[in-house]
Amino acid sequence: MGLDERVVDVGDHVDDGVPHAHDGVLRVGHLVSRSKDGRGYPVRSDALTSAGGPVTAPNPTAATGEADRYRLPRTVVPSHYDLVLEPDLGAATFTGTVAIDVEVVEPVDEIVLNALDLEIDRATLVGPNGTRLAGSVTYDADTERALIDIEDAAAPGRWRLELSFRGELNDKLVGFYRSTYVDEDGATQTLAVSQMESTHARRAFPCFDEPDFKATFAVTLVVADGLTALSNAAEIADEPTDDGRRRVRFATTMKMSTYLVAFVVGPLEVTEAVTTRGGVPIRVAHPRGKGHLAPYALDAAVFCLDFFADWFDIPYPGDKLDLVAVPDFAFGAMENLGCVTFREVLLLIDPESATQPELERLVDVVAHELAHMWFGDLVTMGWWEGIWLNEAFATFMEMLATDAYRPEWQRWVSFGLSRTAAFDVDALAATRPIEFPVISPEDAEGMFDLLTYEKGAAVLRMLEQYLGPDTFRDGIRRYISTHQYGNTVTTDLWDAIEESSGEPVRRIMDSWIYQGGFPAVGVDLEQDRHVVRLTQRRFQALDPKGSEPDATEWSVPVTLRVGRGDESTVERVLLEGDTTTVDLDRPADWVHVNVDGAGFYRVRYSPAAREALLAHRGQLAAIERYGLVDDAWAAVLADELDAPSFLALVRELAADEDDLSVWQRIAGGLGALDRLVPAPAREAWTATVRALARPALDRIGWEPAAAEDERHRQLRGTLVSLLGTVGADDEVVARSRALHDRHLAGEKGLDPALVAAAIEVVAGSGTAEDFDAFAGRVRAASTPQEEVRYTYALADFPGAEELDRLLAMTLTDEIRTQNGAFVLRRALLNRENGPQAWAFVQSHWSEISERLPSMSMVRMVEGVRALSTPELAAQVEAFFAEHPLPQATKTLAQHLEAMRVNVGVREREADRIAAAVTD
């Protein structure tokens, strides 16, 4: 499943591929290896010994039987579902029947399965000889289960459980729900859509809703004539019914988990199929009139499916693939086998008007979901604590596939932004291990955060680069081939890679998976530059109310480049314990640790090593220069470097920097400092920003060159946005306004990166008239990307009245519920009016909670981190003491800690940076 937001505010950050202003606050995320029976956690005796003892997997059920409240008994096991659903879109209801082939393992007089918000009208257990046992149904709402009492005990053997049921097409974007769009004629059209992950299949049909209860599914949808019906497998029959509807039957799926079952019914159009090299037909289903926006995604999907079939060395496990654009969708996308659902903005696109990040984001999400067809669908975690591995691996694979699809985008370089977002979460005392015990559905929902996706992908990338790509891939192939159609635990993966590589993979990875946090690796050149000394200690941002970092240690796969003149060599070493040394055969002029930025650790150079490295920075790759800026800003958050020193580093690097990602990170740091500058120093501050960034814009010019690559075009947009917002550059603002006027007038051929930047710049100084124009453009947008750009930019306006208008819109259908949380979060990030947005959130908490999807609430709350005055921070903490978020307890704690970190930065650095720019 793709998160609704992935790259989080580290400069030109991206929500669904949309560039934002440079608000620069500390970011945190939004979204434990069991034994085969799902009850205990295996730990090898050679597990890494840390300062606190061996790194071992936690056992959530050793002390209590709490997990048993939510785990179904294994006395009845499903093997096949015959499911018939009849949705009534007008009434927002559905009825259904399901016949489940089960194996009764031991005599039972009660069958327990999952059901939520359903009424089961009839239950019968049918034996192989025709015996029919009636069942009476009761419900346990707390554990989301239906208990079926059978009139007589059922003996072990094969039975069929027949159920009839009914429910509502809800408006919560989970289970079987309704979505709407306005068609080209202005009429509202309604769809019925499913979203089952993590534990929402039970809202659509009674089922054994746990990932290791794999079964096959034969779905039939009875729908009104004229509607499109889609499910996981190929359509095998479409027959009229006696009442004027149609009965659409689909082939039986492979063996899979309930959370992957999908059905979509509604007024959709479907493109002609295109076929992969392996013969898989791929289509895009979309709201009527939007077929012209589908070809780019189709092209990417064909490439990715072929790429993954080759990489895994196993054919795609489905019989067809539909990519479905859904108008209302809580996540980014969902990897239902053969029927992948997406937000429109992540599937439908006009490549002529889209920015490079928007195109990249679309390919990323398509690749992510298709990687899941193997890693997640074909091989599935045994229980929800393993969801990190599905999502982390799919995130890793999206980078691999996108980089192969468009090498010029330098996807592993731009992944630095995602890694930074994960670093920012993991630098908090309130972080968590990547894998942790999951007991309840709320626990499962809490897994979908940046630690699961971005940190997980980052540590996989670190392992891949340490072992070598071919060795890593061989281990993955062994894992997939061994466990296809089954369920696994995390250690199954490490063991497969260890067998292929001969390296202590489980020992290395246990230290990263079962411990929160990460190290800062210290670097020094000693003994006349013949020895590189490496040390490690836990890195932690400074929370004024927090405690000192503990003595946690990791098994750190370190890569370092040793430079001598214009030549360099790469060394690899496993840093275990607090110190290790690398002996060199001859003196080094300089050394750079973390080659290609693949390691998930910060780097701290001694003064002499740092000076030597900066003198040779021209020999560093872009992602390595990015790391210099990123590590320096992290040091400010940890109170290891002051803001003026960070600014001095940026000045030095910016003088000749021309990489997009490096400038995005510079812009993020400058945006963070922008929040600290007192009013008397603001004019001097904006002049400082202009002096830093204007030479870079002057070097590349305002007009794109014919042969210019997409990243260079996006760099221009980043610089324009930085100068027009943080730098308050009058010329840039004027030119942006003129460009935006041309865009509103319908002029074709304008550079998309400049148009997106101009929208940000105009919003940042916008008037009431501009607000009206933006709101109108939301309604009249020609692409999903333009709609989202203008929707989110409404939160950047400086006027209090305009913000009031926007905040009121979030409680109406003027802002889709899927976007409402992100609009409110961005309003909280508004440098001038964040407190006003917070007052609105407090006073309308009940309405917001009722309206927005449950999982998106914590995304909205992320914005409180920008409220970095002590008075506001105290208000926020007091409010959430009374208004917890049970579906995201840990993430909320992270948001609050990050807010306190920002309070501390303000208190330490505001006067320092003011003095630095006014001297």
Image: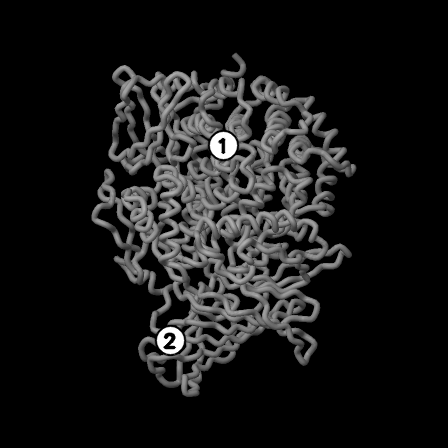
Tell me the amino acid under the disc marked 1.
Thr
Within 10 angstroms of label 2, few (less than 14), some, or many (20 or more) residues? some
Task: List x then y, in percent, for residue 676.
Answer: 51, 26
- Write down the quadrant of residue 568 in the picture: top left
Q: Is residue 607 among the parts visible in the rendering?
A: no
Point 31% across, 21% down: residue: 524
Residue 195 position (above or below residue 879):
below
Using residue 644 as the reference point, say whether residue 511 is left or right of it: left
Residue 312 position (above or below residue 589):
below
Residue 175 position (above or below residue 831):
below
**Which mark is on residue 835?**
none
Circle 2 residue? 103
Task: List x then y, in percent, for residue 491.
Answer: 31, 52
Point 41% across, 84% down: residue: 128
Q: Is residue 38 among the parts visible in the rendering?
A: yes
> Nearer the observer, disc 2 or disc 1?
2
**Closest to the observer: 824 or 575?**
575
Tell me the amino acid under the disc marked 2.
Glu
Instruction: Name the outermost residue toward the top.
Output: 919
Task: List x then y, in percent, for residue 705.
Answer: 67, 27
* Helix, strand or loop at mark 2: strand
Q: CA distance from mark 2 to mark 1?
A: 61 Å
Residue 474 position (above or below residue 255):
above
Circle 1 residue? 869
Q: How many labels sit on residues?
A: 2
